[in-house]
Amino acid sequence: MRQTELYSPPSRVRSLIEGALAAPEVVFPRTGTIACQGVEGANSQAACDKILPRGNIMYVKSFEAVFDAVESGLCQFGVLPIENSANGSVRMVYDLLQRKRFSIVRGTTLHIRHELLAKPGTKLSEITEIYSHEQAIGQCSRYLGSLNGKVKVIPCANTAIAAKMVAEGINPKAAAISSHACAELYGLETIKDDIQDSDNNYTRFICIAKNPIIYAGSNKISLILDCKNEPGALNSILTKISAYGVNTSKLESCPVTGRNFEFIFFFDLDASVREQGVLPMLEELERISESFTFLGNYSVI
């Protein structure tokens, strides 16, 4: 047993995790109510179907509304995109996780393919406006750049909402960056397929809950850390993680709003708090960090 386990005072992360582990270990449910940003056909819906195959989906307008639905008790869970392999992390979701102190209880990854959709009979050369979510716009930046500014690109809340807007709108020259499923759902035609910058285009989704729950088989830990602004501070954190034999599968820096050239760090660790030494490691990280947020211990399917 390490000295830190013998002599260190109780920490907030220990209290949080031990409280979550006090309940009997259970498998993740297959049914329940789940909040999803967007409308029918959204990638988040596909993630909901994968995470909770027999769940009842409630569609809401924004990422924050997903949190609100869970916080109010309208839904047991919420599903949100957190990272894309081409366009990086979804900063707003990390901000909400940190501010509202929700827990990640499950995760999944989807292969994302983008198509340019328009009303039947519309030609590619006729398009003057393209609607989509900002993440999808970023994932298709190469194709959009090839249009040489001839088309107005308009961000909206969701790729499925973009398809719905085009289908229901009066502009016959509007198009949406969306999915093949949305083309079928909203009666649109694909006028250009596979417009994403890379075929290796994956989005990671998380399932959140109001209270920390650690389900059976959980093997990924997500954290947000703010280390001291001094030489070797980040290296000290990485060294401690390595010393416990834990793999860091994600490390991303993010600027802190309102603080010049200071950063917080998003971490994913391949570990379970049920493994020996992992909880003491988290306590050490909490002690040496300026701020420390334990986002959850969960499995990715």
Image (cartoon, rainbow, N blue to C red):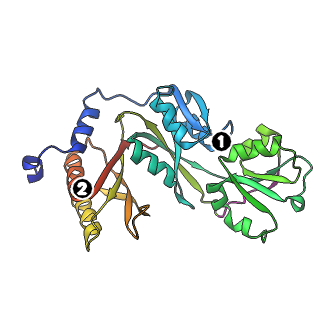
Question: Residue 254 in the image: x percent, y percent?
Answer: 43, 62
Q: Which mark is residue 42?
A: 1
Q: Which residues are magenta?
A: 190-197
Question: Residue 250 in the image: x percent, y percent?
Answer: 41, 59
The image quarter containing residue 291 is bottom left
Q: Is residue 206 left or right of residue 56?
A: left
Q: Residue at x 78, y 72 (%)?
A: 148
Q: Which secondary structure lies at badge 1?
A: loop
Q: Residue at x 73, y 42 (%)?
A: 181
Q: How far separated are the C-alphas under marks 1 and 2?
A: 37 Å
Q: Which residue ends up furthest to the front in the rendered image?
A: 258
Q: Which residue is mark 2?
A: 285
Instruction: Please check the rendered image and state whether residue 290 is part of the magenta-colored stretch, yes or no.
Output: no
The image quarter containing residue 53 is top right
Callout 1 amino acid: Ala
Q: Is residue 165 above or below residue 91?
A: above
Q: Is residue 77 left or right of residue 132?
A: left
Q: Is residue 234 left or right of residue 251?
A: left
- Residue 219 visible to the viewer: no
Instruction: Please check the rendered image and state whether residue 194 is part of the magenta-colored stretch, yes or no.
Output: yes
Q: Residue at x 52, y 41 (%)?
A: 64
Mark 1 and mark 2 lie on one chain; the one further toward the N terminus is 1
Question: Residue 279 in the image: x percent, y percent?
Answer: 22, 46
